[in-house]
Every structure is written in C-alpha cells, then in structure tokens.
Image: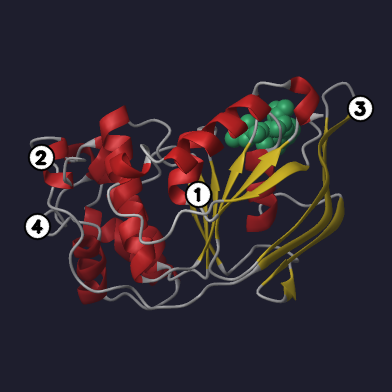
Amino acid sequence: MLPSASEATDTEPAGITGTAPHSTAGAGVVAEGVRVDFPSPDGSTLRVLDGVTVTVPPGQFVSLLGPSGCGKSTFLNAVAGLVPTSGGTITVGGQQLDGLNRHAGYMFQEDTLLPWTSALDNVLLPMRAAGKPDVAEAERLLELVGLSGFSRRRPGELSGGMRKRVQFARLLAQDPDLILMDEPFGALDALTKIVMQQELLRVWDLAPRTVLFVTHDPGEAILLSDRILVFGSRPGRIVFDEQVGIDRPRGDLSQVMKRPDYRELYDVLLHRLMSPEDLR
Ligand SMILES: Nc1ncnc2c1ncn2[C@@H]1O[C@H](COP(=O)(O)OP(=O)(O)O)[C@@H](O)[C@H]1O
Ligand SMILES: [Mg+2]
C-alpha cells in the first residue's frame, strides 16, 4: 500500500477532498511537421525538432519520453506558444496557434511560486490576472489538492510536496483546457514523488482534461498516461507511439507497478531509450 499524503511527512496534509474543478474534456492538440531551429552562437542553426506530427484527442493524458536534450521541453514550449516554430503547424482546440496559447496551464519542474506571499495569494494570481479573483474558489482548490488549513502559509513554510500542490492548485485556478507539465515532480524525493503522482491522478480523474506530461522516467509515464510518445535523439521527432492499456481509475499505484503489463511496457520503453538505433 502507498502511504496516504498525510503519512508522507509529518507535515504533509490529508489527501484530496472537495469537489472537482470545472469539468471539461479539454482541448485537443494537433502538431503537423513541427520544426524548431535555434540560432547557435557561432552563427549556425541548431535544429532541435524536425517533423513532429501527432494528434492528441481532447481529454487524453499523454507522456513525452526521450533522452535528455532531444527537445521535449522545446516541444512543450512550442505548444505553449512560448517558442516560435520554424516550420509546421500546431492546432489547439481547433485553432491554429499564433502566439501565446491561452488554453494552456503550465507547470514546470522549478518552484515558480512567489515566495513572499501566501499559498492563497499564489493561487489567486491567475484569477487576478484574468480580472476575476475569487477567494472562496481559491480556498476550494487548495482543499482539493489536500491543503486545507495551509492557505495562509508562505511557500518557505511548506514542504517540497506541499509547494507542488500549491503549484497544481494555481494551475487549476486558470481552469486550463490543456495542462502542460514539464518534469513537475523531477526534483522531489522518491516517496513524495509517488504520493504526488497518485494525487495528480485523483484530481485528474475528477475532471479529465488534455495533459502533455514530460518525463524521463518510463515508470512515471506508464502510471499516469493513456499514451506515451517517445522522442528520438535531436533533432527530436516521435519514434514510438504506445497506448497504455491500464484501466482507470488506476487506484493504488504501488499495485499498478506489480502488474505484468506494467513491467512488460516498462521493459519495452527502457530498451528503446537505451538503444541508440531505436532513437534515430
Ligand atoms: N532558447 C533556446 N535557445 C537555444 N537553444 C536552446 C533553447 N532551448 C533549448 N535549446 C537547446 O535545444 C536542445 C533541446 O533542449 P530541451 O528541449 O530542453 O531538451 P529536453 O527537454 O528533451 O531535455 C538542447 O540542446 C538545448 O540546449
Ligand atoms: Mg526538458
């Protein structure tokens, strides 16, 4: 059995409570022949992505897996509209992307909370930016991610896992149609990481929406996703597209890890990631 969130550390709060955020299937993403070139200091061009083509239907949870430097973060940034494409098109929710993607909520590996203000104020931030601050809704989202009673604490007074929960509540406060997560749990210790994976799935199960989740961990990709896209070495493109056939809700993830189909897919993914010829 996995520990509950409250058992993860002395100060970790209880697990998910409350009702789901606004329910939506999310926005689908279609990438066609996406290319991204960056200028190099010597005047040449670094081609980071070349020919990335994929259709992600609304509500699908997709992990992007691949060797370091293959362009996973760059692809996510392109879908977020933070990095311009040099070729190809990206369509989100049926509309071709041209500038910042307003459907998307982004969660990075780094701690991006404002350290000088409370968890509540951090969650209110996107609501204020949208001109609709709603303290009751922000409190509800903090409760949803298991942080009731912690809303007045500043990030420095919270554990690493709890700060991730605040970041997640802040992302939900945007009510995004598309969730982009770039190794969000990469800096957490192993136990907190699996608690957070479990919590992410619990919240997602309440209101599934499209997720693009970057990870370098095949196990994390299988536990969370409906589908796994493996990127080849730079210039990155998709070399392997695999459905995960494990039913939802997935329940106790430590039990999922014992399933033969989990182990089988883990071995396939690991083999591919470790075989340069499969990544070309
Ligand atoms: N803004 C940028 N300018 C120049 N090069 C970049 C920029 N962003 C990423 N790169 C380069 O693109 C490559 C892919 O980076 P990244 O997308 O972060 O890979 P991954 O997330 O798969 O590890 C790396 O070689 C990186 O140095
Ligand atoms: Mg990256």
Q: Tag 2's secondary structure? A: loop
Q: Earlier in the sequence, mark 3 or mark 1?
A: 3
Q: Earlier in the sequence, mark 1 or mark 2?
A: 2
Q: Is residue 108 left or right of residue 45?
A: left
Label 3 to label 1, Cα distance in Å? Answer: 30 Å
Image quadrant holding the N terminus, namely top left
Q: Nearer the viewer, mark 4 or mark 2?
A: 2
Residue 190, above or below 137: above
The residue carrying pointer 4 sits among few (fewer than 14), some (14 to 19) or many (20 or more) residues within 10 Å by Cα, namely few
**Residue indicated by mark 3:** 44
Q: Amino acid at mark 3?
A: Ser
Q: Nearer the viewer, mark 2 or mark 3?
A: 2
Per the rendering, the mark at residue 168 is none
Per the rendering, the mark at residue 181 is 1
Residue 185 position, x and y percent, is 40, 38
Residue 15 position, x and y percent, is 17, 54
**Residue indicated by mark 2:** 11
